[in-house]
Amino acid sequence: MKNFLISIKLTLVLIVLCAFLFPILIAMISKLAPGGGKGETVMAHGRVVGYARIGQKFTEDKFFWGRPSAVDYNASGSAGSNKGPTNPDYLKTVQGRIDSFLVHNPGIKKEEIPSEMVTASGSGLDPDISPASAYVQVKRVATVRGIPADKVKQLVEAHIDRPLFGMLGPSKVNVLRLNVALDEIGSKK
């Protein structure tokens, strides 16, 4: 009976800590984050066009494309495909993405396509791509928009987020912010 009462007390203490105090603490900390815990929004022309930390689907040639999504960019159902690297369905999907990328980016060789441009992430909602993935798309975007490739490349370079302290994490480019900036220079032509 003594152990039973101790376990009941411990359970009640853990319920209060884990179900009430911890969520309140996290909610208070989130208020310090960009967006006040409601997500960091990206604005264009005075309206919200998306969230900085949730990938969006860009398929038009005039935009930079993000990493493919196994959940079709559905933020309510974040997930990967759960198919292994030797799964025939997965390999067929990746080959289809490679073929599509090559059609939309003439002059690019298969070996030049960064793997992240044809493989989905674990979350399916990656908002960022590597600088290499952005650079490989510069020619297509510049050609479609009628903007000099050097100017588009400079825009990519201006949107590279460098690693924290120069060493913690990879360099990355936020696709939504890059496309919003691209639309802004496109409208100034």
Image: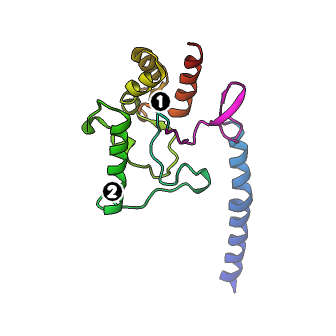
Magenta region, main secondary structure: loop
Q: Which mark is residue 92?
A: 2
Specify the amino acid type for callout 1: Leu
Quadrant location, the C terminus:
top right
Q: Which residue is at the front of the view, 82 or 136?
A: 136
Tell me: residue 28, above or below residue 172.
below
Q: Mark yes or no: residue 183 visible.
A: yes
Q: Residue at x 53, y 42 (%)?
A: 57
- Which corner quadrant of the image does residue 83 belong to? bottom left
Label 2: how many Cα within 10 Å (few below 14, some 14–19, many 20+) = few
Q: Which mark is residue 164?
A: 1
Q: Assess whether residue 66 is covered by the magenta stretch.
A: no
Callout 1 touching callout 2 (CB < 8 Å):
no
| Residue 114, x across and y down, in percent | 33, 38
Element marked by disc 1: loop
- Total numbered circles: 2
Judge left or right: residue 88 versus residue 80: left
Tell me: residue 155, above or below residue 59.
above
Quadrant location, the N terminus:
bottom right
Q: Residue at x 55, y 48 (%)?
A: 73
| Residue 131, x across and y down, in percent | 40, 29
Residue span colored magenta: 33-59
Tell me: residue 147, above or below residue 79.
above
Q: How is the image coloured?
A: rainbow
Q: Mark yes or no: residue 34 visible.
A: no
Q: Residue at x 42, y 61 (%)?
A: 82
Q: Residue at x 69, y 35 (%)?
A: 35
Specify the amino acid type for callout 2: Lys
Q: Which mark is residue 24?
A: none
Q: Which residue is at the front of the view, 27 or 160?
A: 160
